[in-house]
Image (cartoon, grey):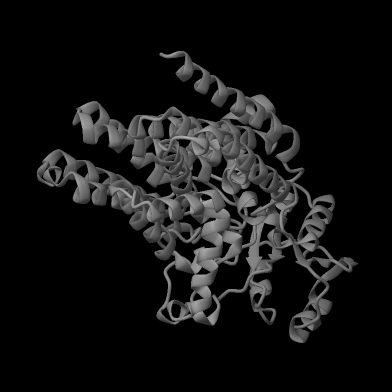
Amino acid sequence: MTNSSGKIKNVLFLIIILWSALQIIFAIPDSVVEDWAGWRQADTQTIARNFFNSGENIFYPQINWGGNGPGYLECEFQLYTYSASLLMYVTGETELPGQLLNILVIALTAITIFLLVKYKLKNESAALAGSVVFLTSNLGMHLSTAVMPDAMCILFYVIGFYFFVKFLDDKSNSSMLLFVLFSILSALIKPMALNLGIIQFFIVLFGYRQLLKSPKLWLSWLSIVAVTTVYLLFSNSLYQQYGNTFGVLSGDSKFPTLKGLMQPVQYAKIIYLSVVWGLGVLGTLGFIYLVIKRRVSVIEWALIIGNLAAIFIPMRYTVDRGASHYYVFTAFFGAWLVGKAYMVLNEKEGRVKKILPSFAAVMILVFYLGHMYLRINPQSFHYEPEVVKIGNKLKEIVKPGDLIIARSVADEREQSEWGNRINNFEDPRIFYLANVKGWSLPNDSKGFERIKKYIELGADYFAEPFNRYDDETLYDWLDKNAELIFESDYGRIFRLSNF
C-alpha cells in the first residue's frame, strides 16, 4: 500500500466516523410516525416490535392491522426487521436499533462503493468521491436514520455488483457464489433489486459476450430468480390464509397503466425525483459530462437500462414523491457516475487537475448541508399531525388486548389514471402509536356495515383522525350504537362495547 493510498482510505474512514456522529446527533427523528415516510416506518417498526414481543420466526412477520387474527403478512424477506428485533434485547423496545443499524449499513455501502470504483476504475480519488457522494446523498442521509429495509437492500445490492464485476475478470467460483448470495439477499429484501440481474445481463451482452455460453453463469442467474420466487410464493400463502399484504404479489399493483403512461406529467415527475432523490445533482452533471466526452462505457449503459427498469416497472409508485425510496438503486448509479466523471476529469493536466479535489469537496459539502436540512425538516406531506394526535390519545384509553378500528387517510381504490385498482389503504400509524391490533377502515368507506361487522368480531374502539361529518348514515348509526368518548379538532374516538 502506498502512502497516498493509505491517506485516502484514512480520509474515507474519518469522513464516515464524522458523518455517523452527525447523523446520530442531528438526524435521528423523535418519532418514526412524524418523520419522512412515517407510514412505512411505522409498519416496519411494528414488525420488528412484534418479532421482539412474540418470538415468531423470521418467516412469519406480523402487522397490527390484521383484525383479530395473528396479523401474519405477505411481504418481502424481513431480515432487517428481525435483525433490529434482536438488537432490542440490548436496547429495549425502542426505534433506536433499526436507526443505528441503518447508519452502519449505509456506511458499509459507502465503503463497498469505494472498493468497487477503486477496483474497476483504478483510481482511489475517484473511489473516494463516489463513496462520499453516496454517503451524503439525499437517500443516503434519509435511509440511514429511517426504520426501513431499503438501506440493507442496497448494501447487498452493491456487494453483489462488486463480486459480479470481479467474476467477469477472474471467472472464479468464489466470486460467482458471492455475487449470487448477495444478489439473492438484496432481491429477497426488495424484489425490485432483481434489476441487478438486468444490469449483469447487459454488461455481459455488451462487453463479455462469450460468457453467454457459460452454463454456470446462467445457473447463477436462474438460482437468484428461483430462490426469490420460492420465497415470494411462500409469502403469498400467508396472504391467502390471513388476508394481509404489502402488495408484493397480491393487493395493489405497482405496474403502470396505459392511461398513466400517456400522461407527460408523469415523466416530469420521474425526472424530478431521479435528480433530487436518485442520481442527485452531482450524479446528473457527471452523466452529462461523460456523454459529452463520449466516455459512457458498457457498465454505464447497463446501469442505465437496469435503472430504467427499476423506475418504470413500478411506475405507479415511482411518480409519487412519497415513494422516493424507490430511487435507491439510482442513488448508487449516481455515486458511480460521480466516481467515473472524477476519474476522467483527473486525467486532465494543469489547473483542472489541481483544483478538482477542493472543488469536489466544496460541492459535496454544499449538497450534504442541503440534504441534512431536508432530513431534519421532512416535508409535511410525509405525516399528518391529526393522525399522530389521535393515536397518542387512543394510547391513553386502550388496555392490552383491546381491538380497534382506525380510519385511514388513504382510499380503497387507486386514482383513475392507474386503473381504479385496489389500493393498500391500511394506515399503520394509529395502531403503532396505541400499540393495539384491529382493523383499518378506508378513507372513502361509507355507511356502517363494515364497522358493525368488526364490532361483531370484537372491536372495542373506533378512532377517526380529522373532525369529519361527511357520512350522515354512519354518524347517525354511531349515535345509537356507540359512545363518543373523545372529540377535538383533530379527531374522535368512539367506544363500541360496554357503553
Position of the N terminus by quadrant: top left
Measured along the vertical axis of the image, is residue 296 above or below residue 56? below
User: Residue at left 61%, top 28%?
Assistant: 15
Q: Is residue 478 visible?
A: yes
- The quadrant of the rendering that contains the C terminus is bottom right
Residue at point 64%, 30% (across, down): 20
Residue 322 image position (x, y, % from top left): 61, 61
Residue furthest bottom as drawn: 472
Horizontal side of 330 relative to 301 (left or right) equals: right
Percent coordinates x, y for residue 193 in the rendering: 39, 49
Horizontal and vertical percent position of residue 194: 35, 51
Vertical arrangement, residue 411 with respect to residue 130, above or below: below
Q: Residue at x 35, y 39 (%)?
A: 161
Side of 497 relative to 155 (left or right) = right
Is residue 71 among the parts visible in the rendering?
no
Percent coordinates x, y for residue 26 in the rendering? 75, 37
Numbered disc total: 0
In this picture, is 156 found above or below 235? Answer: above
Q: Is residue 4 left or right of residue 230?
A: right
- For the residue pair 80 and 456, the one nearer the viewer reads as 80
- Taking depth in this image into account, of 314 and 362 the one nearest to the observer is 362
Quarter of image, res 103: top right
- Indicate the quadrant where residue 183 lies: top left
Where is residue 121, by image quadrant?
Answer: top left
Residue at (56% x, 54% y) in the render: 277
